[in-house]
Structures are given as structure tokens and as C-alpha cells.
Amino acid sequence: MLLAIDVGNTNLTIGLYRGREIGPHWRLGTDHHRMPDEYGLQLLGLLEHAGVKLDELEGIVLSSVVPQLTSRLVESCRRYLKCEPLVVGPDLKTGVSILYHSPASVGPDRIADAAAAVHLHGVPAIVVDFGTATTFNAITADREYLGGAIAPGILTAADALTEHTSRLPRIDVVRPPCVIGRNTVHAMQSGLYYGYVALVEGLLERMKRELGGGQIKTIATGGLAELIAQETDVFNVIDPWLTLEGLRILWEMNR
């Protein structure tokens, strides 16, 4: 089996693959203070919960946008899972030409998303990944990763709104009953929810024009993909676990 781990600033996304089929998968909170022993014991606990023995583990693939946690997870895998993880970076075979001005600065999660888009859904494509940041990733018909856009994630924006105002409360980011909020909570939810729907629609329209128009696949992924996608018809594919699929593909290409 393959263990795929994507370390984000807010979530740790983990999935087990038997061949190309995803098995048990989890979305956990990222703890920036957790040490290698703690992560190692957590990973062992997840494998045990899934009924997987260590000798069934064929490989581990890891992407991380949190540099201080990358080495800790690598150490955890070595020490507790007895396996050297494949760490995603720009030097791997991806099936995608990275045309970013500085390829090394492209987040490994964005590389995984691009690889999954190319190999599973077809190109040209734009992948929108809803996480701590909302990232837009453009891939041409020639499998070229051009770049995209990075906006604050909707939960990041919600936290900032509360932290930098004196009277606004913390809220759950959900679809409010109407666009015109009749109380403070609904007004905040409207601004965040419908504001992000409009942001996504507007950026996708502009990026499609820059890509030349035509049939461009639009893919939503990340923990909040389904929340936003339910309010708009701009997405052809909604795949919350796309990054894990990309990690599996990268592992198969580089094993």
C-alpha cells in the first residue's frame, strides 16, 4: 500500500492507496508544534485503525508547504514506519513542464494538483484549491504549468475580519439564508461566502481568457471545495482529494 501525506498550513491530509484506489483517508488539523515522535505515533495509530500492517506499506509520498514540519514528518516516517518518503519538489518527474519564473518556488501541493489534472481530467485546465490560501493553477493543452493566482483562504479571511475589528464576532463560514444579511452574523457570512463565490467566478473568467478560451476544464479541490462549488456552476469537476491523487501519480512516476 501507498501512504500519501499532504501537509498544509491548516490541515494534514492523509490517504492510503491500494493500487490506484484510495482507501481510508483523513483530514486532520496541522499542529506546528508537534514533534517527530508525536507525528510518528499518530501515523501508526491511523494505520492500525485502518487495519494496515507495516509490512504492507510499499511506499510513502509527502508534500509539505510547512518547511519546519517537512523534516519532522520525514523523520517520523523513517523511525516509526521504517520507510523513506518521497518528498515532492520541482526536481521530480511530473509530466508537467513548470514555466513559473522560479520553478523551485511552486508549492508541492500545486505540483501535485497539476499532475492530477493532467493525468486524470485532461488539459487545458484550471485547478482551484480551497485551503489556508485559495490557489488558482493554470495548465495549458501542452501540459505546461503557467502559474495562477493566490488569494487568502475563506477561513483565513474570516479570522482576519474578526481579529482586526473590535465588535465583529467569530462565525462559522456557511451559506447564509440570503445575500442581504439582516443581522451581523448573516452579513459577515454573506460577505465571506458570496464574496468568495464571486472571486472564484471572476478570476476563472479572466484566466480562461488569458488561456485563449475554448474548452478549459475547471476543477475544485480542497476542504472547502464542495461548500463553494454548491453555489456556482463554473466547475466541471469537484474532487476534494485531488492533491492526494496527484501525490499517488507522482510516486508512481518516480518510484
Image: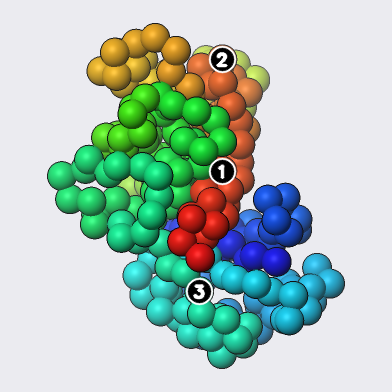
Mark 3 or mark 1, earlier in chain: 3
Residue topped by disc 3: 85
What residue type is disc 3 on?
Answer: Pro
Judging depth in this view, the residue of 26 and 78 nearest the camera is 78
- Residue that lies at the very extreme toward the right in this rendered image: 51
Judging depth in this view, the residue of 44 and 91 nearest the camera is 91
The picture quadrant where one finds residue 99 is top left
Q: CA distance from mark 3 to mark 1?
A: 20 Å
Residue topped by disc 2: 233
Would residue 167 be found to the left or right of residue 23 on screen?
left
Q: Position of residue 168 (x, y in %)?
A: 45, 41
Give the number of the disc on residue 242: 1
Q: Position of residue 55 (x, y in %)?
A: 73, 81
Q: Residue at x 47, y 79 (%)?
A: 74
Q: Residue at x 42, y 41 (%)?
A: 114
The picture quadrant where one finds residue 56 is bottom right
- Residue that lies at the very extreme toward the left in this rendered image: 101
Q: Is residue 76 above or below residue 161?
A: below
Q: Is residue 58 above or below residue 220?
A: below
Callout 2: 10 Å neighbours few (<14), some, many (20+)?
few
Mark 2 or mark 3, earlier in chain: 3
Q: Mark 2 and 3 residues: CB-CB less than 8 Å, in contact?
A: no
Q: Position of residue 111 (x, y in %)?
A: 39, 48
